Image (tube, rainbow, N blue to C red):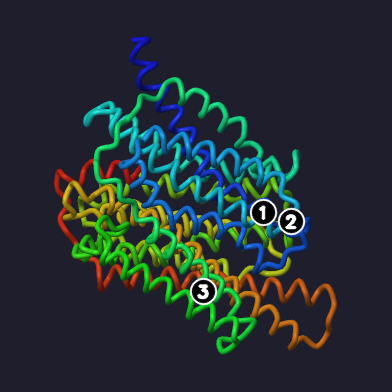
Amino acid sequence: MIKKIKGHWIILILLALAQFMVVLDVSIVNVMLPTVQKVFHMSQTNLQWVVTAYTLTFGGFLLLGGRAADLYGRRKIFLTGVFMFTLASLLDGLSQSGTMLIVLRAFQGLAGAFMSPAALSIILVTYKQGHDRNVALSVWGAVASGGAAVGVLLGGILTQYFGWRWNFLVNVPVGLFVFFWATRLLPIHESEETDKSLDLPGAITITGGLMLLVYALQKAPANGWTSHTTIYSLLVSFALISVFVFNELKARKPLVPFKIFRYKNLAAANLLQLTIAGALFSVFFFTSLYVQEILHFSPVKTGLCFLIIPLFIGATASNAPKLIRKIGYKRILSIAPIISASGLFYLSFIPVHGSYFKDIMPGLILMGSGLGFIFVSLLVAATSGVEKQLSGLASGLINTAQQLGGSLGLAIITGQVAASTTRYLVNAHAQNSATVIAGTVHGYQVAFKIAAVFALIAGLIAIFLIRNVKPSENHEETTKMAAA
C-alpha cells in the first residue's frame, strides 16, 4: 500500500498542484487589477494586457508544449516548465513597472504552456484506463475548476492583507515544493517518437500574429481604423497568420494538422469556444473594476462576489451529462448561450449607485448557469466522431481556443469601452468627478452589451453549424471528464 501511494497518488498530488498554479494565475490577477492600475499608473487598455499577455502565450504555445512532452520526455518538459513558471512568478512579484509586469506575464504563460500538457500526459501514462484513471482525472478536473474559483478569493485576500505582489510570490514556495519532489518521485518517461521535429515556427508565427491582432483591435477604436498604427499592425498580423497557415500545410509534423478540421463539429466547437470565452473573460475583468472602483468593495469582498459563478457552473455542469443523454448536446449548446447572454444583458444596466445583490448577483447567476451546460456539451461536441488517436489534439484545440478567444474578446471590448467612455466625457456638459464616474460606468455597460452579443453569436453557431451525434459509449468518459 505504501509503495502504491508513493508511486501513484503522491505523483498525482504533485501534478495537481502544478495545474492548480497554472489555472490559479488566470483568475487570481482579476481582483488585484485596480490596485496594480493605481500603483503603475496604467490606462485601462494597457491594464488588460496583464491578463492577455498570459493567456495569449499560454494558448499560443499550449499545443507546442504537448508536442514537446511527447518528443523530448514528459518528465523533462514538466520539470522545465515548473522551474520556468516558478521563476516567472518570482519576477512578476518583483516587477517595477506595468511594462515589466506584462512582459513577465507573457513569459509565465509560456512556461505554463509547457507545464500543463506535460502534467496531464504523465497522468495518462501513469494510470491505466479504468477506475484509477477515472479517479485521477476527476481529481485533475476538480483542481482545474477549483483553481479558478479559489483564485478570485485568494487574490482578494492576498491583495488586501499582504499586497498585490503576493498574488505571484505565493507560487514560489509551491513551485519549489513541486520541483523538489518531482525530481525524486517522477519516473523517467521516454519519448514515444524517434522523429524529433518540433513546429517552433508555427507556434511563434501564430502567437506573434495573434498578439499583433489583439494590439490592433485594442487600439483601433481610439486611434482610428485608418491610422498607420492600426493598418500596419493588422497587415503584419495577417502576414504572420498567413505564414503560419502555409507552414502548417508544408510542415512534416505541423502544430495543428488541418486535416483534423474535416470533423465539422470540431471547427464549429472552436468558433463557439472563441466567442463564449470572449464574453467570460470580459465579465471577470470589468466586474472586478466596477465593484472596486465604483461600489468601493474591498479586494476580499470582491473575491467573494465572484464565487457565485463557479457554484452555479458546478451545479449545472454536474447535471449536463444526464441532459446530453436525453436531448443531445446541440439543443443544449443552442439554448445555454442565451441563458448566459441574458445574464450579461442584465449586467449591462449596472448603475452608478448600484447594489451587488440587486444589480450584479442575478446576472452572474444566469451567466454561470449557462456556462456549466456549455462547457460540458462543448467538449463532447468537439470530440464526437473524432478518432481516438486524435481526441487529445481535439481537446487541446478547444483549450487553446478558450485562451485565444478570451484574449481577442477582451481586446475588442476594452477598445470599445475606452472609446465609448471618451465620447461620453466629450459630450458631457460638465467635467467633474461625478461625470467621470458616470462615463466609466457607461463604458462598463457597453462592455457587457458587447459580451452579450458574443454569447448570442455562440448560440447561433450552435444552431447552424453544430451537428447532433447521438452520444455513445465512446463518449461516456469524455462526458465525465468534461463535467469534472
Q: Residues within 10 Å of mark 1 (few under 14, many from 20)?
A: many
Q: Position of residue 363 (x, y in %)?
A: 53, 61
- Say which residue appears at 74% left-offset and 88% top-offset: 427
Kindly report the distance in space between the C-alpha atoms of the residues bearing marks 3 and 2: 31 Å
Q: Residues within 10 Å of mark 3 (few under 14, many from 20)?
A: many
Q: Position of residue 353 (x, y in %)?
A: 73, 66
Asked whether the residues under the numbered discs 3 and 2 touch, taking CB atoms below 8 Å apart as contact, a structural biologist would say no
- Which quadrant of the figure has residue 341? bottom left
Residue 33: mark: none
Residue tagged by mark 1? 101
Q: Left or right: 417 with respect to 386?
A: right
Mark 3 or 2, closer to the camera:
2
Identify residue type, mark 1: Leu
Tell how many labels: 3
- The secondary element bearing badge 3 is classed as helix
Identify residue type, mark 2: Ser
- The disc, 3 or 1, on the residue closer to the chain's N-terminal end is 1
Q: Position of residue 77 (x, y in %)?
A: 42, 38
Asked whether the residues under the numbered discs 3 and 1 touch, taking CB atoms below 8 Å apart as contact, a structural biologist would say no
- Which quadrant of the figure has residue 264? bottom left
Kindly report the distance in space between the C-alpha atoms of the residues bearing marks 3 and 1: 28 Å
Residue tagged by mark 2? 97
- The secondary element bearing badge 1 is classed as helix
